[in-house]
Image (spheres, rainbow, N blue to C red):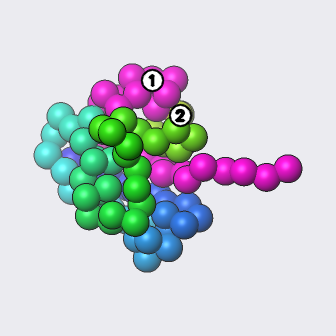
Amino acid sequence: MQIELRFFANFREAVGQKTVQREYESGLQAGDVLRQLSEEYTEMDLFEDGELREYLTILRNGTDIAHLDGLETALEDGDELSVFPPVAGG
């Protein structure tokens, strides 16, 4: 299946581009893809003690995976997975 990965802020810098099209085997979950990305781009630092770092925002087709099945959110061909670092400001 093909997934479009979108990166923002310092994650975009780590990857070197805004979007990446990747082929994955069917049946993967968001956590599987995020773990692969974290291994490939160690400067992204997505996990702490095996859990997704607090304050990261991961969207599947525009919906936060926290409102779906979290890291177990199923991915399908053509999905878009957006990865946002923590945002601060005021």
Q: Which residue is rendered at x = 57% and y = 40% of the image?
A: 55
Can residue 86 be spotted in the picture? yes
Q: Which residue is rendered at x = 14% and y = 46% of the image?
A: 25
In space, the residues marked 2 and 1 are separated at their CA atoms by 8 Å
Can residue 80 be spotted in the picture? no
Crowd rating for badge 2 (residues with CA inside 10 Å; few <14, some 14–19, many 20+): few
Circle 1 sits on which residue? 68
Circle 2 sits on which residue? 63
Q: How far from the left and from the top, in percent, is residue 31?
A: 30, 38
**Which kind of residue does numbered mark 2 sit on?**
Thr
Q: In this view, does 84 lie to the left or right of 50?
A: right
Task: Say above or below: 52 vs 36.
Answer: above
Determine the image quadrant of residue 51.
top left
- Residue lying at the far front in this picture: please name it: 49
Determine the image quadrant of residue 39.
bottom left
Magenta region: 65-90
